[in-house]
Image (cartoon, rainbow, N blue to C red):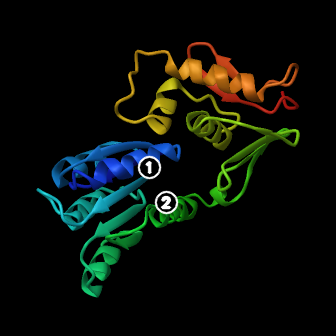
Amino acid sequence: MRLLIIEDDPKLAPLLARGLREEGFAVDVSGDGDDGALRAVEQDYDLIVLDVMLPGLDGFEVLEQLRTKGRRTPVLMLTSRGSVQDRVRGLNGGADDYLKKPFAFEELLARIHALLRRAAPECDARLRVDDLLLDPLARKVTRGGSVIDLTAREFSILEYLLRHAGRVISRTQLSEHVWDENFDAMSNVIDVTVYRLREKIDRKGAALVHTVRGAGYVLRDPAKP
């Protein structure tokens, strides 16, 4: 899943980005309200972490632009302000949650997962195709009851393919949802990562992930035509 952090703190922003990337998220970072608003409206993000105090547009104004243009992306607002009025203003403006600075990264991560589950209720359930089972909350994958050890990127690709099982997913879709803006579209990293994923989850005569020449990849139940 791809997140956008709009935060101007030169120490906090990279720390959040690094921590979330280690959790398997693709993360873009913006350091001011004007640039952040543009990205939030034009790009397809799964969630936005939005600071209130920003150069240019402040967080409330970014949120207003986002909602006015019909974007329903979940927004978690961050603020050093503790007043009830600010929290109410953010929530009434369309924010989905509010977190006061300073905070523990573990709490931020828990709130992000909660918002993603709320935005897509199926996230609460484990994902299954044939005897492959992925638990998004436990970050665990098994096939035939045997645990499969995946990298964070492999896990993200598999989760995305499972959520769109039976549909052909293009390399562009994978790059937009699994990698961040620094991804080199000309590299073969997607093909290499999918190849390694297939080596771990596929079995002879019961392959799950298939290449669709010129189109991308599809995850299908081998028992179904």
Q: Say left or right for 12 vs 177.
A: left
Q: Residue at x 65, y 43 (%)?
A: 163
Residue 44: which quarter of the image? top left
In front of the other: 38 or 143: 143
Q: Amino acid at mark 1?
A: Gly
Q: CA distance from mark 1 to mark 2?
A: 9 Å
Q: Is residue 45 visible?
A: no
Percent of width and height locating residue 181 = 35, 34
Q: Does the residue at mark 1 contact the one at mark 2 (Cβ under 8 Å)? A: yes
Percent of width and height locating residue 85 = 25, 85
Percent of width and height locating residue 78 = 31, 67
Q: Amino acid at mark 2?
A: Leu
Note whether 214 is above or below 110 in the view shown.
above
Q: Residue furthest top?
A: 213
Crowding at dot 1, Cα within 10 Å, few <14 / some 14-19 / many 20+, comes out as: some
Residue 33: which quarter of the image? bottom left
Label 1 vs 2, first from the N-terminus: 1
Mark 2, residue position: 109
Crowding at dot 2, Cα within 10 Å, few <14 / some 14-19 / many 20+, comes out as: some
Looking at the rendered image, the quarter that the C terminus falls into is top right
Count of labels in the image: 2
Label 1 residue SS: helix
**1 or 2: mark nearer the eye:** 1
Label disc, if present, on residue 19 of the rendered structure: 1
Percent of width and height locating residue 27 = 40, 43
Note whether 203 is above or below 167 in the view shown.
above
In front of the other: 33 or 70: 33
